Amino acid sequence: MSIQDYNGFKLKSKEEKRLNRILKNYLKYNLFEIKPNPSDSDLNNIGYKLLRSPHYSDENWSWLHWQPSYQRPYSIMIDEYILFLYFKTSHLKNMVLDFYDSEKLKQKAQFNIPTENEMIFSIPHKEYLKIVRNIRDYGVKVVVNELDTNLDKIHQRLGAKGKMNQKLKSEIKRKIANSEVALGKKLTIKNKAEIIMEVMSRCVNT
């Protein structure tokens, strides 16, 4: 994910290079051929915690999501897993960055290092659902705040002062949420622009 530009997740350059060396040296098609070298400096002082809600995604929607500001450890949800990646073991005692209210679960998980067998901490579906909902609520808040800001900018570019009328904003938000386009197209610039134009034009004409 980190080597793809503009996706919001970015490791430091030296961390990318380190993981690249690890993958080159150890990634095998046959898992039984993977033999970590305890004297390899790339494998020292690095580790991770891994949480999983087994089979959660068989019947429920899930996410590929990360928080760009969470780097100690890097915190990533991938389907029914949550990965906490540490590039220094000292980060285990770092300031708490609570990844969508998963901190208590993270504290219970075992810290994995490359030279030992992996341990995955199992989470009940009920607990995982809480985290999923927290991510959803965060996403909604980000989208709404961004839309609010953009509507105020449009309002000002049209020559008005201050912020757009709240009633007008609410109608635009409601129409975007209830628009009958495909789910993946609701928040596209095209769909939002058409709805904003339609609502604002009607207000001007009335």
Image (spheres, rainbow, N blue to C red):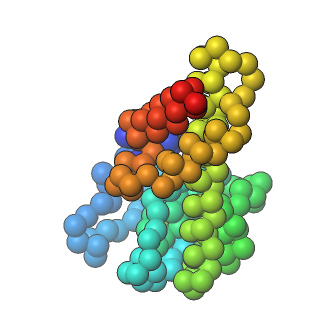
- How far across and how far down the image is residue 83, in percent? 52, 64
What residue sits 68% from the left and 18% below the top? 160
Q: In the rendered view, would you say 28 is above or below 163? A: below
What residue sits 64% from the left and 45% below the top? 170
In the depicted view, which residue is nearer to us: 192 or 28? 192
| Quarter holding residue 124 | bottom right
Residue 128, can we see it?
yes
In the depicted view, which residue is nearer to us: 51 or 133? 133
- How far across and how far down the image is residue 161, in percent? 73, 19
Quadrant of the frame with the C terminus: top right
Q: Is residue 179 left or right of residue 126?
A: left
Q: Is residue 128 left or right of residue 79?
A: right
| Quarter holding residue 130 | bottom right
| Quarter holding residue 7 | top left
In the depicted view, which residue is nearer to us: 198 or 95? 198
Say how many tags the image has.
0
Specify the farthest residue to the front: 206
Specify the farthest residue to the top: 159
Q: In the rendered view, would you say 152 is above or below 54? A: above
Q: In the rendered view, would you say 134 is above or below 187? A: below
What residue sits 59% from the left and 53% below the top? 140
In the depicted view, which residue is nearer to us: 185 or 14? 185
- How far across and how far down the image is residue 50, in percent? 53, 71
What residue sits 54% from the left and 27% below the top? 205
Residue 22, can we see it?
no
